[in-house]
Image: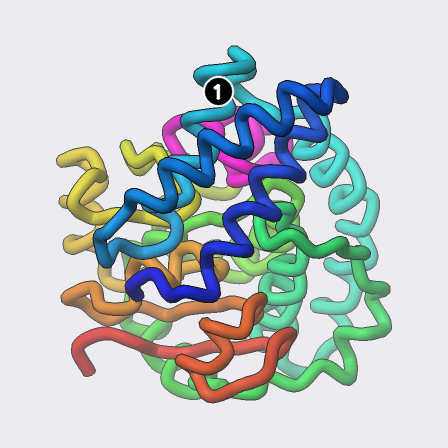
Amino acid sequence: MRIHPECYPCFLRQAYATLRLVTQDEGIQERVLKEIMEKLSMYEGKDPPPKVSRIIYGTIIQHLSVIDPYKEKKAESNRMAMGLYPKLKEAVRRNADPLYMAVKVAIVGNIIDFGVGRTFELEGVEALEGLDLIISHYDQFRRDLEDAKKILYIGDNAGEVVFDKVLIEELSEKEIFFAVRSKPIINDVTLQDAREAGIDQVARVVESGCWAPGTLLDEVSPEFRELFFGADMVISKGQGNFETLDDAPRDIYFLLRAKCDVVAQILGVHVGDTLLIKGGLS
């Protein structure tokens, strides 16, 4: 997915929200925002939004020397989500189709995202029962799972990974690799965040080699690239991964909520809709 004009106001909202986390000095906020606006005004490429967003975070890190502005918020998200974990597991256990409920749990977890400039609340477990997937390729997902032995699960955000854990535990007979970002950016999940959520207990956690709130295949490590193309099945979580992998040359299952007008229009849905989509070659 290439950048759209509507992305620029979103970039500035992200920038301001991040600046407010690390400094209350309005003079610094204004100076850094103006530099970000200048850099964005000179950008002329057609890259995916997650790649362009590095202009924001690179500039903030450069000026304020803060490597992980969302560190505390990520830890808080993990704690909140882990508090819900027993109820999430019970909802899966009670359902007639535990795998389908686990898929819905994972997608509901995608609400946790500070990068889209919206507030969020972790939904009650009760909401899962009535949740509809607006686009659902679940039947094909289940069939493909039967034949898959090695699965690459590409994570998205801290906190959300606890919801991912619920789904991964339903895939316990498979060899699961869980991919995280190689360096902190927004609240995207890193190795430390995944370990805090206990993902390393149910999957082998690997770094993508990419510094972006998405997965840029031209920047990932050789090891990740081999895993990406060698896995029997790839599960991609969240909008940032969709924005960077929607045209990838292999089949991918995208689990996400549409969080902005641009992505919603591309997919033909409304903002907030929940989706399980098979994209790629077939």
Check disc 1 and report its element: helix, strand or loop: helix
Would you say residue 180 is visible in this rendering? no
The C terminus, quarter of image: bottom left
Measured as percent of width and height from the top left, residue 183 is found at: 41, 26
Magenta-drawn segment: 179-199
Residue for point 23% across, 62% down: 232
Residue 273 colored in magenta in the image: no
18 is higher (above) or lower (below) than 102: above
For label 1, the crowd category at 10 Å Cα-Cα, with few meaning under 14, some 14 to 19 and many 20 or more, is some
Q: Is residue 23 left or right of residue 30?
A: right
Q: Which residue carries the number 1 mark?
A: 61
Q: Residue at x 45, y 42 (%)?
A: 203
Determine which quarter of the picture holds residue 96: bottom right
The amino acid pointed to by label 1 is Ile
Quadrant where the N terminus sits is bottom left
Horizontal and vertical percent for residue 204?
A: 40, 37
Q: Quadrant of residue 147?
A: bottom left
The one of 273 and 96 positioned closer to us in this rendering:
273
User: Which x, y percent locates residue 156?
Assistant: 50, 49
- Residue displayed at 41% across by 68% down: 254
| Left or right side of 123 for 276 | left
Left-right relation of 83 to 153:
right
